[in-house]
Image (cartoon, rainbow, N blue to C red):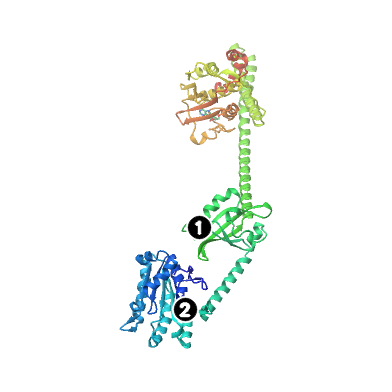
């Protein structure tokens, strides 16, 4: 049964729950019109089915007129069937006798009708003026029994008794059978309460008082509110928000308690609580507290009915310490990650040192062996041919050592942020073409077909020619190194989206997918075994990446194992405004310094 309170329409009674049975001892018709009219009016407004059963002391018209004095649309309610004005003979009497079975059947019929027709409940007023003394006994017994029907249904009943027709004994019974009995004394309405109802009400009041006290002493702030208004808050709420007393909060909105960035969330949350299906829910939010402090809070809310309206009861929990623990957990996780990273770095460095030792030892051993052979040849085979061969071996291996040492020096400089590039305007197309041409000797000796292609005649951009040369030589030496004899290497330069794109593509051994992500990390080699076919330290590509990024560019890889690899560099098309004309790169390429650079970068390929 719906426990919500209904407005009785009678001032001295106020709101009543379903199942209330009211009586009135009247002295004149005016007495019961005074209460009955507002009682029915309130029922009609509250979407209840209203029935007025009248007796011989009044008429249908008189009731209708009295109701019309208070409401304009009585005819409308009558036509709709929400209001029924009926004579007692249609209800109580059969064969000229009071008939309890007939009466109860009628009530049950109307209670069913109420539900089927979408009314909230049933409200009845019945005048008993017709009762003769011989009917009174059975009527009072009936009144006691009807309480069972009323208290189990959405039903409010109001019985009118002519005070002149009832004796003291009947008055006692009437008081017993009703929750309230209205009387009139010196023109003022008064109520006599049924003792049982009185005791029950007191118990409810005391219970409510106890709950109120319990909520009051709860350490967590508690609010009763709807979307606009706070109706109640406990002491903790006053303390936490830092206001002087609860009156500073009552009547205001919950939304004003949270900082601006949280307002929208809270508004939506309260709206969902009031209109949605969920009986309870929670929200992690923030609360503006004493001295301007903002605390992390959890708002746990439950929907319920308070003084006849849907409201939300919200308990606020300070979760600042939980959030702090959360923050700490995040810091610990981050530190753990850093620790794991530094352990991994340490492992890679150790691995690198053992690799480097091998890389250093190999050329040194070759140089030593060549010197020993030369010493021997001085004595025995003293031929120019042999001398040249050993000198070339020594030179080649010195280049390998130089390459390694250069790479180590450069990566250390880059790491320490000491490596600076010097930007100048250069024709990048010409530069890449010349570099490709200058390494063809190395490709030829491996029978690799090296090819340059560009749809641009020239493209001047601001770049550091030494850095770009380093990058391209590294990519080309890798392409030749990791492409078997008879393979192909293609270099392409084109423009796309305000960027110069340089692609170095080979059809060599390719790089497995899982290695492609880390290929630009320092000390990474696909094959780390000491018996691997190609030499190298795994530093080259990390220098390539760092130098390209210093130009605000990007480098990427596209490779398939067994099919080949393509390294793509994107450089922004920017020029220096006050730079003089493009410097001549070709002269630089012819210099001995440049020849040395190629020999150094390609030193692995001859070995
Ligand atoms: P390294 O000095 O060892 O060549 P890099 O950083 O230049 O160092 O290259 C790292 C690794 O990436 C190489 O050892 C090789 O395994 C792989 N790699 C680089 N370029 C290619 C390529 N074109 N084809 C296949 N593998 C390549």
Quarter of image, ligand 1: top right
Nearer-the-camera pick, 61 or 464: 61
**Image coordinates for residue 580, horizontal then vertical, percent:** 62, 15
Identify the residue shown where x is 38% and y is 88%: 134
**Image coordinates for residue 559, horizontal then vertical, percent:** 48, 30
**Image coordinates for residue 541, horizontal then vertical, percent:** 57, 29
**Is residue 414 rendered to the left or right of residue 497?**
right
Which quarter of the figure has residue 96? bottom left
Q: Which badge, 1 or 2, comes first in the chain's sequence?
A: 2
Q: Which mark is residue 24?
A: 2
Q: Is residue 607 visible?
A: no
Crowd rating for badge 2 (residues with CA inside 10 Å; few <14, some 14–19, many 20+): many
Nearer-the-camera pick, 388 or 74: 74
Task: Using the numbered discs, state the Cα–Cα distance from disc 1 to disc 2 in whole angstroms.
Answer: 42 Å
**Relative height, residue 336 to residue 98 (above, below):** above
Quarter of the image where the C terminus is located: top right
Q: Are marks 1 and 2 in contact (CB under 8 Å)?
A: no
Residue at the top extreme, as displayed: 384
Nearer-the-camera pick, 378 or 290: 290
Q: Which mark is residue 273?
A: 1
Nearer-the-camera pick, 527 or 172: 172
Q: Secondary structure at mark 2?
A: strand
**Relative height, residue 409 to residue 298 (above, below):** above
Q: Give the mark toward the camera: 1 or 2.
A: 2
**Relative height, residue 76 to residue 595 (above, below):** below
Which quarter of the figure has residue 606? top right
Q: Is residue 103 visible?
A: yes
Q: Secondary structure at mark 1?
A: helix
Quarter of the image where the N terminus is located: bottom left
**Relative height, residue 317 to residue 414 (above, below):** below
**Image coordinates for residue 593, horizontal then vertical, percent:** 63, 16
């Amino acid at each position: 049964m719906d426990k919500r309170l209904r407005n009785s329409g009678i001032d001295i009674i106020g709101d009543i729950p379903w199942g209330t049975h009211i009586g009135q001892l009247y002295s004149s018709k005016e007495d019961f019109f005074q209460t009955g009219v507002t009682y029915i009016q309130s029922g009609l407004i509250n979407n209840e089915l209203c029935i007025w059963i009248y007796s011989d002391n009044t008429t249908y018209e008189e009731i209708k007129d009295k109701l019309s004095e208070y409401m304009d649309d009585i005819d409308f309610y009558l036509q709709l069937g929400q209001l029924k004005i009926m004579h007692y003979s249609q209800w109580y009497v059969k064969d000229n006798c009071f008939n309890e079975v007939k009466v109860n059947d009628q009530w049950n019929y109307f209670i069913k009708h109420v539900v089927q027709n979408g009314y909230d409940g049933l409200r009845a007023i019945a005048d008993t003026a017709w009762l003769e003394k011989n009917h009174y006994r059975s009527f009072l017994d009936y009144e006691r029994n009807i309480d069972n029907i009323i208290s189990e249904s959405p039903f409010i009943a109001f019985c009118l008794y002519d005070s002149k027709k009832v004796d003291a004994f009947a008055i006692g019974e009437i008081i017993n059978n009703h929750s309230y009995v209205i009387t009139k004394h010196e023109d003022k309405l008064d109520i006599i309460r049924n003792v049982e109802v009185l005791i029950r009400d007191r118990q409810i009041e005391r219970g409510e008082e106890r709950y109120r006290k319990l909520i009051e002493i709860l350490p967590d702030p508690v609010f009763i509110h709807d979307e606009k208004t706070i109706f109640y808050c406990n002491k903790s709420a006053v303390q936490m928000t830092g206001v002087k007393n609860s009156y500073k909060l009552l009547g205001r909105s919950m939304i004003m308690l949270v900082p601006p960035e949280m307002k929208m969330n809270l508004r939506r949350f309260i709206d969902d609580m009031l209109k949605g299906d969920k009986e309870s829910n929670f929200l992690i939010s923030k609360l503006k507290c004493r001295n301007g402090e903002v605390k992390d809070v959890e708002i746990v809310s439950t929907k319920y009915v308070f003084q006849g309206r849907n409201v939300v009861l919200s308990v606020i929990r300070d979760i600042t310490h939980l959030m702090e623990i959360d923050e700490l957990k995040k810091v610990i996780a981050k530190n753990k990650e850093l620790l794991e990273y530094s352990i991994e770095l340490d492992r890679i460095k150790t691995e690198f040192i053992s690799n480097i030792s091998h890389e250093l030892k190999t050329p040194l051993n070759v140089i030593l062996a060549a010197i020993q052979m030369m010493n021997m040849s001085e004595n025995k085979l003293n031929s120019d041919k042999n001398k040249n061969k050993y000198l070339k071996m020594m030179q080649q291996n010195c280049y390998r050592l130089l390459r390694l040492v250069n790479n180590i020096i450069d990566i250390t400089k880059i790491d320490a942020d000491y490596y600076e590039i010097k930007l100048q305007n250069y024709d990048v197309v010409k530069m890449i073409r010349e570099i490709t041409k200058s390494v063809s000797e190395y490709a030829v000796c491996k029978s690799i077909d090296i090819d340059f292609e560009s749809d641009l005649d020239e493209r001047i951009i601001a770049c550091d020619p030494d850095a770009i040369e380093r990058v391209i030589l590294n990519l080309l030496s890798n392409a030749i190194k990791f492409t078997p004899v008879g393979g192909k290497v293609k270099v392409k330069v084109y423009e796309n989206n305000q960027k110069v794109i340089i692609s170095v593509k080979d059809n060599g051994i390719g790089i497995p997918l899982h290695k492609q992500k880390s290929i630009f990390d320092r000390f990474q080699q696909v094959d780390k075994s000491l018996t691997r076919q190609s030499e190298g330290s795994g530093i080259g590509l990390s220098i390539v990446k760092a130098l390209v990024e210093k130009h605000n560019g990007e480098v990427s890889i596209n490779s398939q194992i067994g099919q080949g690899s393509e390294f793509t560099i994107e450089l922004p098309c920017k020029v220096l405004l006050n730079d003089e004309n493009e410097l001549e790169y070709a002269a630089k390429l012819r210099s001995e310094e440049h020849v040395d650079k190629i020999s150094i970068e390609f030193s692995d390929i001859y070995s």
